Amino acid sequence: MINQRHLGKLCPYSKDCPVYQEELKIERVSSFLIKNVFCNRGYKGWKNCERFKLADEGLAIPTTATPYKVK
């Protein structure tokens, strides 16, 4: 079950995230959509973000990593 206190919260890594800061653009997807799907939804969105998973595990995050899983 999702922790209710995280719903609607901003990702704790957003300050240093180039995707959130719009320094790294994702083709064909607006930054507004990215932020609402991954960054501003609390744990529900964070757990789906590849950058969040790496940061949360203390792993290095490639500079080109996006919230989407690389296929």
Image (spheres, grey):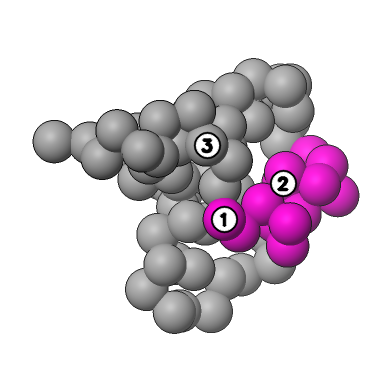
Secondary structure under the numbered disc 2 in the rendered image: loop
Residue 10 in the figure: left or right of residue 52: right
Dot 1 crowding, Cα within 10 Å, few <14, some 14–19, many 20+: some
The tally of labels here is 3
- Confirm whether the magenta stretch covers residue 45: no
Residue 39 in the figure: left or right of residue 64: left
Kind of residue indicated by mark 2: Val
- Report x, y in % for residue 42: 45, 37
Residue 39 in the figure: left or right of residue 30: left
- Confirm whether the magenta stretch covers residue 13: yes
Residue identified by numbered label 1:
12
Mark 2 and mark 1 lie on one chain; the one further toward the N terminus is 1
For the residues bearing labels 2 and 1, Cβ distance under 8 angstroms: no
Kind of residue indicated by mark 1: Pro
Mark 2 and mark 3 lie on one chain; the one further toward the N terminus is 3
Residue identified by numbered label 2:
19
Residue identified by numbered label 3:
9
| Main secondary structure along the magenta-highlighted residues | loop
Residue at the location (81% across, 47% down)?
21
- Report x, y in % for residue 71: 41, 45
Q: In the rendered image of this protein, does residue 19 appear above or below residue 57? A: above
Query: Which of the 4 image quadrants contains residue 48?
Result: top left
Residue at the location (26% across, 40% down)?
3
- Report x, y in % for residue 47: 35, 45
Query: Which residue ends up furthest to the front in the rendered image?
Result: 5
Q: In the rendered image of this protein, does residue 13 appear above or below residue 62? A: above
Secondary structure under the numbered disc 3 in the rendered image: loop
> Where are the magenta residues, as a range?
12-25
Dot 3 crowding, Cα within 10 Å, few <14, some 14–19, many 20+: some
Is residue 24 visible in this depiction of the protein? no
Kind of residue indicated by mark 3: Lys
Residue at the location (61% across, 70% down)?
62
